[in-house]
Amino acid sequence: MTIRFALLGAGRIGHVHAKAVTNNPDSILVAIADALPQAATDLIGIYGGEQRSIDDIAAATDIDAVLICTPTNTHADLIEKFARAGKAIFCEKPIDLSVARVKSCLEVVAQENATLMIGFNRRFDPHFMALKNAVDQGRIGSVEMINIISRDPGAPPPEYIKVSGGIFKDMTIHDFDMARFLLGEEIDTVMASASVLVDPKIGALGDFDSANIILTTASGKQCAISNSRRATYGYDQRIEVHGSLGLVSAENQREVGIEIATADGYTKPPLFDFFMTRYLSAYAAEISAFVAHLKDASAATPSGDDGLKALIIAEAVLKSVHENRGVSLSEIA
């Protein structure tokens, strides 16, 4: 059984998913749609398929699933459209910037009994998966505390900040999902502090570029998250899980894992420069997982509910920053 895909959005992340689909022996890229026809044409020249409109893709009988890689403000509408069209759906995070809108969208997904997977790709990173496996195998005992460091090499342009939903819904939302994934319990309360230390233009737009967050479960387990839009040394992505019997950590990755020692000291190659290179294998693995879900009719994860819960955490964190207090998720949900 070959899963026949259509790609919606031929931008940067669309390229990544087009490559993952065409490299998978169990899937094929049939069609691409983009608001800019030339962008779709360029991608077709690399990965094949044909250019079609979104309406044509929804009505097509030769397409089983869609990959939604369009701007965030289109996600919920497209999920509903393709759920009603009977297509399986993979959608990049977030589903929407509004908790209420996400809930109404997921109601449609449930009513149509549609398959929906959300693109929290970090769950599929081989290093983080090995960390998760060590936790699940009980090698460090019961999880007690987690530290997640996620720092971008540079801030996005103001034009992007305006439509991104802010650092917590755009960037930290990946860390919120990883926290839930690794803690094995739902978050109960949050406490956060955020500043503008990198670019005053970000602050002028009502956003932040530097943040520290503590997530706590009802049983008292904690996850501390450190975010920055500036890391002069590369794309900083680390996780440490501390348990009752020990610790497991996933360190930063480099293009090659060597170390050179001379009389001048020890040197290593630079870190990967951004998510397009650091998480390339994770993107391929998540598409492979989605294809596998469709082939064996199993439940797709991360699910729409995972997307909703991460967004609720983001809303609670934003409220914590603005009101300078701890916030319970029950205040948002």
Image: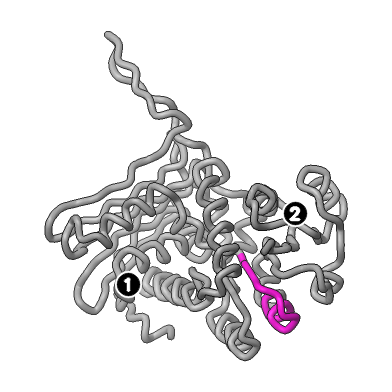
Asked if residue 304 can be seen in this view, the reply is yes
Give the extent of the magenta segment.
79-91
Could you say which disc has been placed on residue 13 in the image? none
Task: Work out whether 242 lies above or below 187.
Answer: above
Q: Based on the picture, tell me whether residue 89 belongs to the magenta stretch.
A: yes
Say which residue label 2 marks.
10
Q: Based on the picture, tell me whether residue 169 belongs to the magenta stretch.
A: no
Q: Earlier in the sequence, mark 2 or mark 1?
A: 2
Residue 328 position, x and y percent, is 33, 81
Say which residue label 1 marks.
190
Q: Judge the density around disc 2: few (<14), some (14-19), many (≥20) Cα neighbours within 10 Å.
A: many
Quarter of the image with the C terminus in it:
bottom left
Secondary structure category for the residue under label 2: loop
Of the residues shown, which amino acid type is indicated by label 2?
Ala
In which quadrant of the rendered view does residue 147 lie?
bottom left
The residue most toward the top is 263
Residue 259 position, x and y percent, is 34, 22
Q: Report the side of 79 relative to 138 (left or right).
A: right
Asked if residue 8 can be seen in this view, the reply is no
Q: Report the side of 183 relative to 125 (left or right).
A: left
Residue 59 position, x and y percent, is 83, 76
* Image point (32%, 63%), residue name: 182
* Image point (29%, 67%), residue name: 183
